[in-house]
């Protein structure tokens, strides 16, 4: 009986942990605080842009408590940091970042968040402004899709210069689309990247673990009840 009670207690604690994880939105972005850097490259991120000159357009990351990314250019450009993520089928997400700008001309697009190759952006921060939150909603109404999240200075056909700062970067899955937020929508008939292997949706492992634990708890309770002596 002691073994059964131990297993029951252990299973309950794991079950509570899983439910807690599922109840809180998870940040899907990897290395969101730029903690991991390999050979001067920020892991899971890649820096790119239109005609990037490393002597003119650069980036710098600060990790730790005040983690942030700075993209700087002394000439007009479209420079950006990218990270690839998978969007589950028929799912909605909120892409969020705090943005600060310094000496960005107000003529063209300044600092923003978007998706690579997409013209829709979550905001347009210009001039010299303190931190403000920027959000972009991504709705995938088609099959599972791979996209590249983009933190950028300037934009497609709207080159700019100055300094753009980004922090508190996250991508969280939502149960429903939210109103009054700029949205990029992928339809059922839109093409998606061809893949030769299966990548499970992000909640699959949690759901499988939850199901296994529920079954285990039921069996443990059944055994415990069976072993409990009946009053004569």
Image (tube, grey):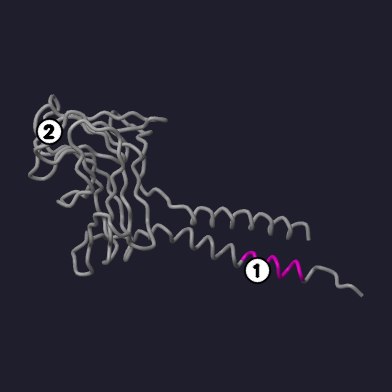
Overall secondary structure of the magenta stretch?
helix
Vertical relation: 202 (above or below) 154: below
Nearest the viewer among 138 and 216 is 138
Nearest the viewer among 8 and 155 is 155
Residue 181: say if magenta: no
Nearest the viewer among 167 and 197 is 167
- Mark identifier at residue 105: 2
Instruction: Name which residue lies at 36% across and 63% down.
Output: 176
Vertical relation: 6 (above or below) 76: below
Q: Quadrant of residue 193?
A: bottom left
Q: Which residue is mark 1?
A: 218
Looking at the picture, how far across and down is residue 85, in whole percent?
A: 30, 51
Which residue is the extreme one toward the right?
232
Give neighbour class at mark 1: few <14, some 14-19, many 20+ (Cα, 10 Å): few
Looking at the picture, how far across and down is residue 107, in whole percent?
A: 9, 38
Q: Which residues are magenta?
A: 216-225
Question: Quarter holding the C terminus?
Answer: bottom right
């Amino acid at each position: 009986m002691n073994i059964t009670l131990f297993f029951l207690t252990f299973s309950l604690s794991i079950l509570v942990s899983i439910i807690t994880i599922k109840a809180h939105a998870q940040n899907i972005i990897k290395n969101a605080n730029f903690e991991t850097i390999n050979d001067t490259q920020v892991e899971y991120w890649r820096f790119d842009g239109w005609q990037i000159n490393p002597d003119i357009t650069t980036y710098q990351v600060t990790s730790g408590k005040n983690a942030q990314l700075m993209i700087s250019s002394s000439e007009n450009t479209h420079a950006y940091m990218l990270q690839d993520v998978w969007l589950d089928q028929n799912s909605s997400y909120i892409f969020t970042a705090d943005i600060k700008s310094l000496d960005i001309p107000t003529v063209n697009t300044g600092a923003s968040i978007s998706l690579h190759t997409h013209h829709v952006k979550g905001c347009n921060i210009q001039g010299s402004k303190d931190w403000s939150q920027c959000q972009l909603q991504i709705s995938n109404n088609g099959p599972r899709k791979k996209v590249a999240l983009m933190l950028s200075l300037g934009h497609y056909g709207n080159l700019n210069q100055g300094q753009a700062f980004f922090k508190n970067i996250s991508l969280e899955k939502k149960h429903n689309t939210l109103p009054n937020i700029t949205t990029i929508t992928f339809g059922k008939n839109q093409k998606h990247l061809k893949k030769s292997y299966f990548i499970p949706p992000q909640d699959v492992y949690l759901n499988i673990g939850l199901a296994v634990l529920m079954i285990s708890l039921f069996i443990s309770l059944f055994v415990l009840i069976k072993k409990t002596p009946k009053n004569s």
